[in-house]
Image (cartoon, rainbow, N blue to C red):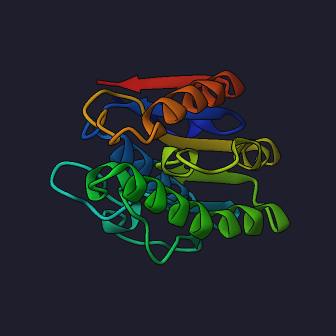
Amino acid sequence: MILKLEDVLGKKVLIAGEAGTGKTMLLVKLLEEANAQSISDAVTLIDLAPKKIGEFGGRVVDYLRQIGGIRLLMPVNVFAPRLSGKTKDEVMSLAEKNREAIEPLLKGFLSKPTRILFINDLTIYLHAGDPELLEKCIEVSETFVGTAYYGTKLQDDKGSGITLRERMLAERIMKKVDKVIFLE
């Protein structure tokens, strides 16, 4: 899929799809364009993706050649609860640790917003986080582009319920944006 920065400026866009479909790489290309057009100082990137585990995950910062003037907000540690947790309690505990690490970043963005906001793997926060906080971040930005897992490969949540919660809240976010791009 070819998506240019000019296609998303002034809009709220969610890139959704299965793991490994290129959501993060599409975000990287848009960030590279922002750098090339010298508007990077108006951009915040909140990178919530865990480090790559096999074919799953992957942070923007692992692919972006140059961060430029982009404001980067990224937790020190992000866990992949469904892949790393072996029991329901472990999955829930990892999701809660992610929420604790991510929430201050979202509040930090709200206290000092930029016109353009990119969020990689926002569904990681939706496992245990407050969707209203995320929605406020989307609302205050003039341009928003986020990526969201929306698939079936990561169904097994060890009975924790985070998969259903993630899907329902991703659909809630889809209703708040101007455009949803599904990658397969």
Q: Quadrant of the N terminus?
A: top left
Q: Quadrant of the C terminus?
A: top left
- Say if residue 112 shows up in the picture: yes
- Looking at the rendering, which quadrant does residue 79 occupy? bottom left
Which residue is at 38% across, 38% downward? 159
Position of 16 compared to 45: left or right? left
Seen from the viewer's position, the closer of residues 114 and 87 is: 87
Seen from the viewer's position, the closer of residues 178 and 81 is: 81
**Residue 122: x %, y % from top left:** 53, 47
Seen from the viewer's position, the closer of residues 99 and 70 is: 99
Can you say whether 105 is above or below 163 in the image?
below
Seen from the viewer's position, the closer of residues 124 and 113 is: 124
Position of 171 compared to 76: left or right? right
Which residue is at 54% across, 60% downward? 96
Can you say whether 45 is above or below 137 in the image?
below
Which residue is at 60% across, 35% downward? 8
Position of 116 compared to 179: left or right? right
